[in-house]
Amino acid sequence: MQRIEFGTDGIRGIVGTWPWHKPIIMRIGQALGEFIQLRSNSGCAVIGRDTRASGADYLSDLSTGLMGQGVNVINLGIMTTPGVAFLTKRFKADLGIIVSASHSSLEYNGIKLVGMNGLRLQQEEENEIESIINKFIEIQPKFSDVLGQETNADHLGNVYIDDHVRHCPVSSLEGLKLILDCAHGAASKLAPEIFRKLGAEIIVINDKLNGNNINYHAGSEHVRAYPDELVNKLHQTDTEYGFAFDGDGDRLVVVDRGGRVFDGQDLLFILALHYKKLGHLRNDTIVTTRLSNLGFEESLLEHGINVTYADKGDKNLEAAMWGGNFVLGGEIGGNLLINDGYHTAADAVYTSLALASVIVQNKGTISLRSIADQIIKRPQKLISFTIFKTFSKAQLTKIEIEIERLRQELGKGSRILFWGSATEHNVYRILAEGERQNAQEEVDKAAAAGKQFIEHVASETLFFSTSQD
């Protein structure tokens, strides 16, 4: 029997493949129920999902498994990942469960978990859950003598909306005009309502939900790759900024009418300077990952802001931020976290309110572009590519040697990173970065050469292994 293991953010895979089958998902629900019951006499879970069609059945299967172990279930229906985290903390539930594959395409789905504090579970807790799940898969457990009850709680979306309106950094967004790209995802009803309540004039696109269009030619990742579509809409509607969410509402990409695409580190820089100016940046420090451009840290230091690094993934960012009592953190992909005492998970809608407040408070004096342009980025190239094979140890060693050779060719202060995506099957990424500002061509060539070498190694049957060593 195959085993289930957690990735950087729960479990994710292709619908219809292992373990995405009704009996297995139900047993995962039972395992989560067992995990809860080992810690709680009451036993309560908050569950929600994004808008992909497969999510409804998976949510039902998980709920059945949870109730079978005597756990009561608060079913939010369609809800953003940060919304589930917020409501789990708000109602002191034992566990928050999100059925979502975030920014991934329709064929994927996933299960994310947050604890009573609204933060991602840590490694030891995930290890315990893995152990229970795999035990329950081998030997199907019996249902409890006393079954849990399910409460339909889709109305709790209003609690999330009211909270965000109340905690917006400014009391009104009147005079602000924005386009919101909702990715046909979980933020499609929440985000527009919040901005309207605050008085903003908004144009909403990609908010039609049919179960099959989540992230399709819409949302943060589409805008990142093809910004011209949203930029054209900005010109057509005489609007300055467009905010694009992903399918589960934790990732944000911003564009302006001039065609500037603001990634996570741009947005983090903007908020870091704003928070420091207001005296809200605790310890004058932000948290990010090593994937950020090294020029990003150098530029922050010029403003008296320090950077501390965490491993990739929201789980690691949360641990670093709450462990160090830092207020602001995030990744280049657009997952930003604001530790203000009320909110936990990366929340694209809440981040967009913070950025909208910056625009309102600086209207007519300074733009998001002029703030972000203060980052003196080093030349950098990121390439994503697909390889339908698993590397052996011998192949990985060979790749590491070549990567180091290419780095040395780029010169002192450069770096080249290679890793496999934790959320997209068979997808690998290579990032090259140089120190000299005029080295973009060399950086591009190094990244391309690294990709070509990795693909060549993958094609060598002599070293090919069918399983991960």
Image: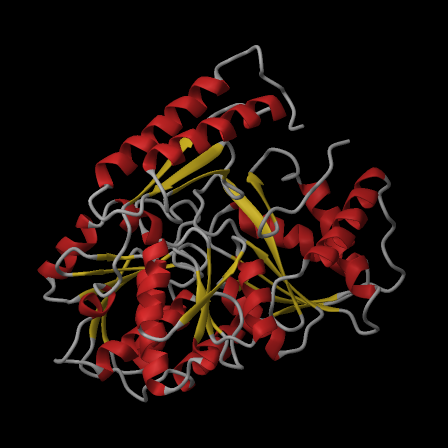
Please indicate whether residue 284 sits to the left or right of residue 21 in the image.
left
In the picture, measured across the screen, residue 87 lies left or right of residue 44, that is left
- Taking the spot 20% from the left edge, 44% from the top edge, the residue there is 438
**Which residue in the rendered view is the most extreme toward the top?**
462
Frontmost residue, 4 versus 451: 451
Position above or below: 456 against 96 = above
Eyeballing the image, is 363 above or below 85? Answer: below
Compared to 52, does 160 lie above or below?
below
Which quadrant is the C terminus positioned in? top right
Q: Position of residue 394 (x, y in %)?
A: 60, 22
Between 139 and 72, the one lying in front of the other is 139
Q: Position of residue 101 (x, y in %)?
A: 51, 49
The colour scheme of the drawn protein is secondary structure
Q: Residue at x 12, y 80 (%)?
A: 364
* 219 with respect to 138 (left or right): left
Indicate the position of residue 330 as horizontal and vertical percent values. Answer: 44, 63
Q: Position of residue 44 (x, y in %)?
A: 73, 70
Is 321 on the left or on the right of 240, as rendered? right
- Examine the image and state in which quarter residue 87 appears: bottom right
Q: Quadrant of the N terminus?
A: top right
